Amino acid sequence: MAFHLSPFTFHLSPFTFPLSSSPIGIYDSGLGGLTVWREVRRALPGESLVYLGDGKNCPYGSRPREEIAHLADKAVAALVARGCKMVVVACNTATAAAIDSLREKYAPMPIVGMEPAVKPACLATRSGVVGVLATERSLDGDLFRRTAARYGEGIEVVAVPGRGFVELVESDREDSPEAEACVRRAVEPMLERGADQIVLGCTHYPFLLPLIGRVVAGRGVEVIDPSPAVARRVVELLDRFDLRAPAGHRPEFGFLTFADEAYRLRLEQKALASLR
Ligand code: DGL
């Protein structure tokens, strides 16, 4: 991987230098943000990407907010040090804990965060009941409260933490009997209330989509993965800031972690496998 821009130069005046060939940074507590990586890669095949999956401190979901904000800052700083022209915080939990402070600290670099897809779910529901699956820390944060209040008027929002989901994905047990038990436990209360939309509010959860699909089969439920919408937002911001890689640019992919080399290789292999 060879990225030549000094982060310093970049940080001082990102928009006066020819930085469009610099990579986009994508960060998550672990493997989950690869669901966003895949969509960004599909939407922007000419862009170089650097993915940072913390790995060492995953799961974030029940850690104190200040600790998550500190970890997110360390991760974004590492991506800036790699010369990234934009960062996607592909972690709902880190977004909920730190997006405002990250945007302030790293301005004017564009930072895209995850928003629970409550709006499209509330617009699409016919039963008037929407389920939201996310981590504990995302669900008790202001971002979720504000989004649910803003779009959920007159709609019943059933929010349930996906207990154990992140651990199952991190240990490649997405298709195990334990995973099925965890998914049933979380989803049943939503189905009982009559939810016809279920929002995946954590980037790890789309890895459980085949299983969730089986659990809700025949119940008339749509499961919403917000990662394609996040990729569209990245495209929009690249265009707005005139940061698209030039024609003919040969994209490179980097994978970073705070865990060990074995974990870094897993990130790389899982990312590349997701494109097949
Ligand atoms: N992928 C993270 C999210 O979107 C997972 C959080 C965790 O590590 O618990 O919230």
Image (cartoon, helix red, strand yellow):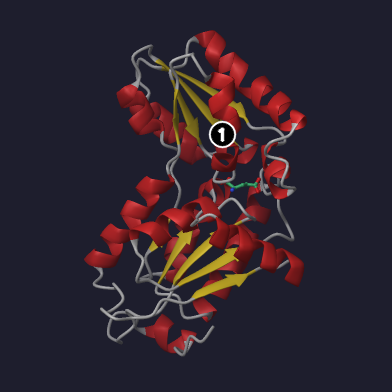
At 41% from the left edge and 83% from the top edge, which residue is drawn? 10
Q: Classify 10 Å Cα crowding around label 1: few (below 14), some (14-19), many (20 and above).
A: few
In-front residue for pair 52/175:
175
At 36% from the left edge and 46% from the top edge, which residue is drawn? 229
SS for dot 1? helix
175 left or right of 8 in image: right
239 left or right of 33 in image: left
In-front residue for pair 177/86:
177
Q: Position of residue 195 (x, y in %)?
A: 47, 16
Q: Amino acid at mark 1?
A: Pro
In the rendered view, would you say 261 is above or below 111?
below
Cβ of mark 1 under 8 Å from ligand 1: the answer is no
Q: Which image quadrant for residue 224?
A: top left
Q: Position of residue 3 (x, y in %)?
A: 48, 85
213 left or right of 235 in image: right
In-front residue for pair 43/10:
43
User: Can you see residue 27?
Assistant: yes
In the rendered view, would you say 230 is above or below 117?
below
Q: Which residue is mark 1?
A: 210
Which quadrant would the N terminus be assigned to in this image? bottom right
In the rendered view, would you say 208 is above or below 100?
above
In the rendered view, would you say 190 is above or below 250?
above
At 39% from the left edge and 69% from the top edge, which residue is drawn? 107
Q: Position of residue 226 (x, y in %)?
A: 42, 42
* Extreme-front residue of the structure: 276
Q: Position of residue 47 (x, y in %)?
A: 38, 71
User: Can you see residue 260?
Assistant: no
